[in-house]
Image (tube, rainbow, N blue to C red):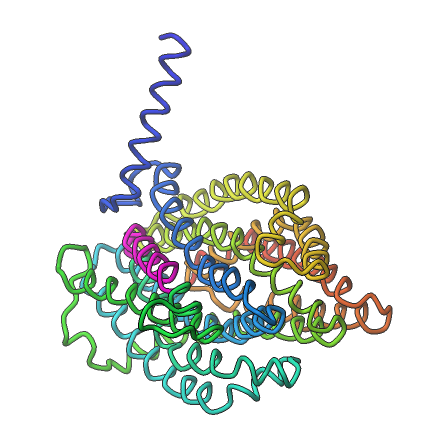
């Protein structure tokens, strides 16, 4: 067989897998080749996470062209930093859902998988009601607490109220996608984010700038558009949960609280939530530290860099989520060695992806930042942040895969303990020391981030090799 024929055969095979991954055809991920299983999961998961990051970028783009754009950009960025705590709740619950659902699917018990998913939704709705009420009442105080100026807090309070008041939509969007990912149907999760983002892209300029009878809401319009867009995505998810065409057959009776199962889910979800609360609170502290040492322009530059960084890190996280699903399903099927091999294969793919992203930010960071704002000082700070942060991108990717493997196995305590040490006992003190005592300002904060991530990766690799995660019962 000629070399060209072999190449054509490989390309044809890849495109077949690509089409299958986008269509979402359900297959037994524990029996096909590991490479094929990763691609089937990773492509829609990466596209899903890319779409999640687009929400913030779309808002940032449109509000960045308003009058007093530094106040608007700072409000969007600081609100996103606060919302990361809500994202932590959503992600923690979605991790528990993925771990339990994937384990039950691996055991060939879809009925139990469906019930576990619905019980997780019951938990999420119950908790988020309190968060939404707090956001509605204390919106302005939240911005002030984050280091925003009084003018910025007055300007952005309504934006915060809408975003936090509708936070249950954010939680459901993450959580239901976690259920679909655990079942191995990542394509539905991907499409829900595509639908939500298309709606947001269409609605953002309408509600921000006004159109016909719709007045120009300015910054507030971004919150309205984003909340409606995410709501449309959740509606699509709910339709697919109940249409009876997927492995998970949902019935109303599954929503009746089962406190034994809820206890099991909470045991997995609680450390997973805490795991991301730890990281989120660290990011919140860093955002406040940048705001107080760099002023409004420093904060706007950091938030711009952070949104750009997350645009590329979220797809990488999507790729790492493939490891979580494969670990869970293979452990459920009793294929322990295959679960471990899936992690190492995923590591190879994420190294390639993150290396490309690093090169892009090192060479084009200034160009990316200038797309979102014309403020020269903001662009300068954002570009500097991107160059420093991108040095550690490959390291971030490795840490993501190892932590996803732990979480997919249901061992959510291991990455939680790593985060406590790396973020609270190392990153925050280092950032404070560099920014305040060495008077490096925002640059000191930027340096502390990849330094801490390197420690996370080393610790995660050592603990992964020890293999305790293989014995976790879910």
* Residue at (21% x, 77% y) in the render: 255
Q: Is residue 57 shown left or right of residue 454? A: left
214 w.r.t. 12: above or below: below
> In the orientation shown, which residue stands out farthest toward the right?
438
204 w.r.t. 295: above or below: above
408 w.r.t. 33: above or below: below
Q: How far from the left and from the top, in percent, is residue 185?
A: 28, 52
Range of residues picked out in magenta: 183-203
Q: Is residue 399 visible?
A: yes
Q: Main secondary structure of the magenta part?
A: helix
> In the orientation shown, which residue stands out farthest toward the front?
212
Q: Is residue 411 magenta?
A: no
* Residue at (47% x, 66% y) in the render: 412
Q: How far from the left and from the top, in percent, is residue 47?
A: 40, 49
Q: Is residue 185 magenta?
A: yes
In the rendered image, the quadrant that contains the N terminus is top left
> In the orientation shown, which residue stands out farthest toward the top?
2
* Residue at (43% x, 59% y) in the render: 52
Q: How far from the left and from the top, in percent, is residue 336?
A: 40, 49
Which of 462 and 454 lies nearest the eye of the viewer? 454
In the rendered image, the quadrant that contains the C terminus is bottom left
400 w.r.t. 28: above or below: below
Q: How far from the left and from the top, in percent, is residue 413?
A: 51, 69
* Quadrant in which residue 355 is drawn: top right
Q: Is residue 7 shown left or right of residue 303? A: left
Which of 193 and 36 lies nearest the eye of the viewer? 193
Which of 58 and 100 lies nearest the eye of the viewer? 58
């Amino acid at each position: 067989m000629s070399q060209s024929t072999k190449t054509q055969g490989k390309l044809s095979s890849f495109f077949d897998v690509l089409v299958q991954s986008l269509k979402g055809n359900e297959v037994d991920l524990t029996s096909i080749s590991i490479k094929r299983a990763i691609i089937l999961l990773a492509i829609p998961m990466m596209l899903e996470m890319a779409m999640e990051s687009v929400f913030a970028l779309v808002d940032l783009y449109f509000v960045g062209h308003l009058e007093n754009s530094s106040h608007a950009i700072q409000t969007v960025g600081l609100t996103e930093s606060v919302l990361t705590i809500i994202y932590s709740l959503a992600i923690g619950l979605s991790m528990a859902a993925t771990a339990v659902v994937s384990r039950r699917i691996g055991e060939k018990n879809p009925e139990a998988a469906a019930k576990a998913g619905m019980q997780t939704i019951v938990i999420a709705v119950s908790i988020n009601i309190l968060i939404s009420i707090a956001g509605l009442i204390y919106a302005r105080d939240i911005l002030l607490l984050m280091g925003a100026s009084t003018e910025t807090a007055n300007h952005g309070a309504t934006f915060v109220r809408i975003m936090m008041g509708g936070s249950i939509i954010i939680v459901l969007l993450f959580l239901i996608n976690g259920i679909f990912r655990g079942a191995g149907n990542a394509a539905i999760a991907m499409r829900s984010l595509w639908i939500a983002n298309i709606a947001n892209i269409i609605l953002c300029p309408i509600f921000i700038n006004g159109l016909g009878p719709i007045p120009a809401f300015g910054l507030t319009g971004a919150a309205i558009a984003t909340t409606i867009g995410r709501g449309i995505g959740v509606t699509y998810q709910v339709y697919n949960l109940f249409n009876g065409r997927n492995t998970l057959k949902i019935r109303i009776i599954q929503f009746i609280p089962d406190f034994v199962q809820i206890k099991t889910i909470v045991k997995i979800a609680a450390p997973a939530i805490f795991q991301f609360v730890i990281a989120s609170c660290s990011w919140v502290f860093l955002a406040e530290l940048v705001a107080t040492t760099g002023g409004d322009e420093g904060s706007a530059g950091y938030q711009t860099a952070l949104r750009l960084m997350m645009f590329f890190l979220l797809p990488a996280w999507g790729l790492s989520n493939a490891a979580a699903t494969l670990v869970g399903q293979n452990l459920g099927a009793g294929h322990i060695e295959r679960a471990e091999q899936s992690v190492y294969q995923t590591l190879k793919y994420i190294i390639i992806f993150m290396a490309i992203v690093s090169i892009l930010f090192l060479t084009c960071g200034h160009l990316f930042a200038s797309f979102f704002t014309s403020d020269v000082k903001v662009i300068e700070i954002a570009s500097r942040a991107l160059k420093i942060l991108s040095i550690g991108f490959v390291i971030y990717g490795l840490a993501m895969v190892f932590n996803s493997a732990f979480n997919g196995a249901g061992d959510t305590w291991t990455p939680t303990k790593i985060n406590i040490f790396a973020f609270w006992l190392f990153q925050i003190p280092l950032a404070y020391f560099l920014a305040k005592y060495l008077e490096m300002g925002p640059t000191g904060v930027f340096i502390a981030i990849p330094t801490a991530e390197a420690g996370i990766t080393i610790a995660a690799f050592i603990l992964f090799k020890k293999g305790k995660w293989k014995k976790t019962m879910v």
